[in-house]
Image: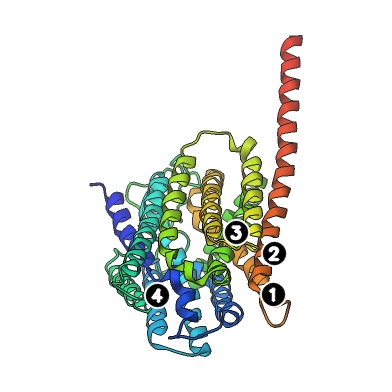
Amino acid sequence: MESWVKLSIWIGIFGFFKEFRPEDPYIIQYLTGPKMNFTDEQVNQIIFPVSTYTSMIELVFVFLITDWLRYKPVVVVCALSGVIVQIMLIWCRGVTAMQVMEVFYGTMSSTEVAYYTYIYAKVDPQYFQQVTSYMRASVLTGRFLSSVVSQIFLFWKIMTIDELNDLTLVGMICAFFWALGLPSVPRSLYFHREVLPAPNNGSIGVPSESTSNGVHRNGAIPSTTPKTEPPSRSCCSSSSYVLGFLWDDFKFAFTNMYVIKWSVWVAVGTCGYTQFMGYVQLLWQNVDKNMTQYNGAVEAVYTLISASAAFLFGRIALNWKVHGDCLLGVLTLVGGILVTFSAFATSMIFCYGVYIVFGTLYHIQMTVAYSEIAKNIKPDSYALVFGVNSLVSLICQTILIYTVASDQMFKLPIQSQFVVYGGSFIVVGAIYLVKSIFTYLNVYTSRRIIASKDNSS
């Protein structure tokens, strides 16, 4: 078995354990149940927003710290934060304790960047697409299995909702110990880059930057015996190199209007998706508390369908430069309409259906968006670009939460919040749909001009 496959399996198993969280489909029932006894308003306006604020603040620093520490320590912190979250959910009580718990949950979320970039520093860029698919598959497998387990255990009364937290704690402990055994990373994308061997004239080697065609950005041919950056280099010199590489990669990506178009949707779409998924159980509580016992089964179905749809769309060969705006416009518009309708729903079957369809539409769009962005940026800048998109998404999410849910602003009830979420998607979808009309008109006009030139010749 090739080394990159072994590494993919190793980090994939960590991803599986990290996402094995049987309590997640029932977290609102647990927090508002007799054991914790919080109100929906406390969960919505006081407890949940803390993790978003924490993630936004930490993500600014986590990317560079992750690269500087060479990934593994931050992966361990991610798993350890998950363990602390579960311990506090099981044994701690009170609003303040849950807010502290949400701080650690935000840390777990922000440090996930180490999980997704660890493998990029360990394997050759030619395998990035394969290892990314393996990592995504391991995450979805963990979510699917945990949802099935939670539903079966509750249906057959093997466990209660409270006891599902114990099972989740076991999964997080397994993730922590597995993370401790991850292979160390000798280099990283920015702080500990590979350097070329010193040339014959005895000059000091320089950090290498591989491109997709195997030639370094400095024009040299890659060495067969790469080395990590010399530790003797001064801190200031090293920092200037890092900032230079970061700025070059950032400028290359975000001066490309095609990358910007997809990145804007990734940031806005992820913001709306995260809000919907994070708060939808509160909406369901207002529709029918008795029906929410099937949350686990619905989560399992959603995971399976969305993974299958994303896999199929990943293999569809279309010119997304032409059809991408239409895809984003139509699917975002449909998703927004469904979310808006769910705010007024009185049927849990309809709400469950919206949950599955909306999540599937999001994953389809994300599959295409990530692929199109990756094709148009430098291979070593994946983590930077997607990290920037995540940061922008969290900023949007923070503004949204502060506006619609906080005591300082509108403090909307959960149904009204979902009208805002749905309306936002409708506006974004309409913008991309209008843009797609102009794109098709430009393509049609260009073809007419080419055809007329061919006929005249």
Amino acid at dot 2: Val
Amino acid type at mark 4? Gly
Q: Earlier in the sequence, mark 4 or mark 1?
A: 4
Q: Residue 307 location, x and y as percent?
A: 43, 50
Which residue is labeled 3 in the image? 247
Circle 4 or circle 1, nearest the eye: 1
Q: Label 1 amino acid?
A: Leu
Q: Position of residue 204 (x, y in %)?
A: 43, 58
At 60% from the left edge and 80% from the top edge, which residue is drawn?
41
Residue 195, disc: none
| Label 1 or label 3, whichever comes before in sequence order | 3
Task: From the image, tell me which residue sits under label 1.
Answer: 412
Q: Where is residue 157, by image quadrant? A: bottom left
Q: Which amino acid does the dot numbered 3 rest on? A: Trp
Q: Are marks 2 and 4 in contact (CB under 8 Å)?
A: no
The picture places residue 53, in percent across and down from the top left corner, at: 59, 76
Contact (CB < 8 A) between labels 4 and 1?
A: no
Residue on which the image places disc 2: 420
Q: CA distance from mark 4 to mark 3?
A: 33 Å
Task: Give the residue pinned by disc 4.
Answer: 82
Q: Is residue 140 left or right of residue 238?
A: left
> Element type at marker 1?
loop
Front tag of 4 and 3: 4
Whether residue 148 can be seen here: yes
Give coordinates of residue 246: x percent, y percent: 56, 60
Q: Are marks 2 and 1 in contact (CB under 8 Å)?
A: yes
User: Distance of mark 2 from mark 1, alpha carbons?
Assistant: 10 Å
Real-space Cα distance between discs 1 and 3? 40 Å
Label 4 and label 1: CA atoms lie apart by 30 Å
